[in-house]
Amino acid sequence: MARGVNRVTLMGNLGKDPEVKYTQGGMAVATFSLATTERAKDKDGNWQDRTEWHNIKAFGRTAEVAGEYLKKGRTVYIEGRIHYDSWDDKETQQKRYRTEIIVNDLIMVGGQREGEGGGFGGGRSGGSKAANNLDQRGPEHDESQAPTGITDEDIPF
């Protein structure tokens, strides 16, 4: 029988500082939310942002690193898997559901945002920011990365 694939790749901004707790066995467990935003034009030609929120959970050393270095607004790249959980709410007796991304790899992207402490370099300044304090600007054109004169014949395949 063939094995299935459960793989998730996300890059976005933290919606809150990670909350780190420890199991009875001493393993760190970090939870936080991650916002991913895609931008598309609507039928009138206006740009619209659509933000999805993801519940993230990390374990072990990854959870400790998240708790120590990640702060709200920080951009991270995450690879992991989807995990679905359900339980009966004790107060309402209703079935409750939660979807989480379990982290396999976490990479801190770029420097810290304005006003953050720590030693990961300065944050961005200027530009437009949404009400949730996440940087919603598009990519900036960098004149120093102009074409270098490489042609198709320079590519070795």
Image (spheres, rainbow, N blue to C red):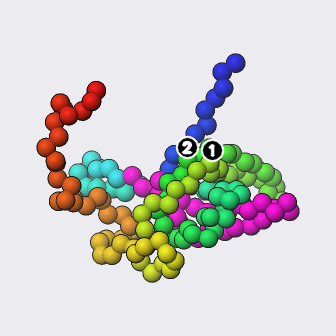
Q: Looking at the image, which is closer to me, 67 or 134?
A: 67
The residue sitting at 28% across, 50% down in the picture is: 41
Mark 2 element type: strand
Q: Is residue 114 left or right of residue 8?
A: left
Judging by the rendered image, the residue that carries numbered circle 2 is: 8
Type of residue at label 2? Val
Quadrant of residue 135 in the image?
bottom left
Q: Residues within 10 Å of mark 1 (few under 14, many from 20)?
A: some
Q: In this view, does 156 lie above or below 56?
A: above
Q: In this view, does 125 lie above or below 61?
A: below
Residue 34 is covered by the magenta coloring? yes
Q: Is residue 131 left or right of residue 102?
A: left
Type of residue at label 1? Ile
Residue 124 in the image: x percent, y percent? Answer: 36, 72
Disc number for residue 82: 1
| Image quadrant occupied by the C terminus | top left
Mark 1 → mark 2, Cα distance in angstroms: 7 Å
Disc number for residue 72: none
Camera sees residue 53: no
Quadrant of residue 54 in the image?
bottom right
The residue sitting at 29% across, 72% down in the picture is: 127
Q: Looking at the image, which is closer to me, 57 or 65?
A: 65
Residue 136 in the image: x percent, y percent? Answer: 36, 64
The residue sitting at 25% across, 55% down in the picture is: 46
Q: Residues within 10 Å of mark 2 (few under 14, many from 20)?
A: some
Q: In this view, does 94 lie above or below 154?
A: below
Mark 1 element type: strand
Q: Are discs 1 and 2 less than 8 Å apart at CB?
A: yes
Q: Which stretch appears magenta?
A: 11-38
Q: Earlier in the sequence, mark 1 or mark 2?
A: 2
Q: Name the dominant secondary structure of the magenta segment.
A: strand
